[in-house]
Image (cartoon, helix red, strand yellow):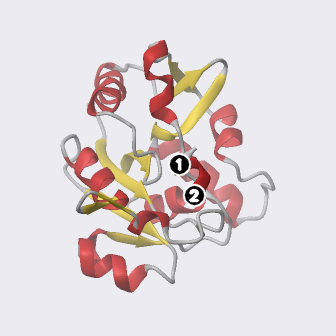
Amino acid sequence: MQNKLYGLVLAGGESRRMGTDKGSILAGEKTWTAIAFEKLSKYCQKVCVSVNSSQEHIYSQKFGYENIIMDNIHIKGPLCGLLSAHKSFPDVDWVILACDMTDITPDLISKIILEYEFQHLSQNIVFCINNHVEPLLGIYKKEFLAVHLSLILNKKLENVSMKHFLETYPTQHILPEEKEYMNFKNYNALQDLFG
């Protein structure tokens, strides 16, 4: 029997290089976070937004307090948001999408969801381009999140990168088509938007 799959938009970064909250940047009339939220909502019965403490009030007004997960683990980076989500809902698997990956298409999300639905082994699932994993659109299994969270809380783990997480636990790699490579761009700084 397949586990529940919830969606998580990662919007809790510090946005230092961008100089403004990336999740609140507008594309047309919608914010990057709202666009990612809508994309995941097509595939998940529940979608949450991962935020840091300075964003909680603004984002809860936009998405409803019940859909906000505030970072509550003392590590930095996207794994903080993912593990905070796991603490809030420990019985579900998570498909994550970073709000600054605005070029991710519904087809790419559909590919990873289909792989999850037909998977018989317990594995995380991410895309891989030229032997580099793309961790910010991926599916993460609850059993591995639970082990990793325990290691972090018990101070038995120093490397808290997403890449290390994916190297530690069974992970399936999906190879996108070459024409889809450009869809995995992160917009981290102003020059990324105009360059």
Q: Quadrant of the C terminus?
A: top right
Q: Residue at x 64, y 45 (%)?
A: 162
Quadrant including the N terminus: top left
Is the residue 17 above or below the residue 102 in the image?
Answer: below
Residue 88 visible in the snapshot: no
Q: In this view, does 95 lie to the left or right of 67?
A: right
| Residue 164 relative to residue 58: left or right | right
127 or 145, nearer to the observer: 127
Residue 194 numbered tag:
1
Q: Tag 2: residue type? A: Leu
Compute the Cα span from label 1 to label 2.
Answer: 7 Å
Q: Where is residue 17 in the image (x, y as percent from the top left)?
A: 65, 63
Q: Is residue 47 above or below residue 58?
A: above
User: Can residue 168 be seen at all in this image of the molecule?
Assistant: yes
Q: Badge 2 is on which residue?
A: 190
Question: Which SS class for mark 2?
Answer: helix
Q: Where is residue 121 in the image (x, y as percent from the top left)?
A: 44, 21
Q: Is residue 115 left or right of residue 126?
A: left
Residue 4, compared with residue 21, is above or below; it is above
Which residue corresponds to the image point at 51% horizontal and 67% vertical from the top-left?
12
Residue 151 place in picture, x, y as percent? 70, 56
Could you say whether the residue bearing mark 1 is in a helix, strand or loop?
helix
Question: Is 27 placed left or right of 55 in the picture?
Answer: left
Residue 13 versus residue 147: which sits nearer the camera?
Answer: 13
Q: In which quarter of the image is residue 154?
A: bottom right
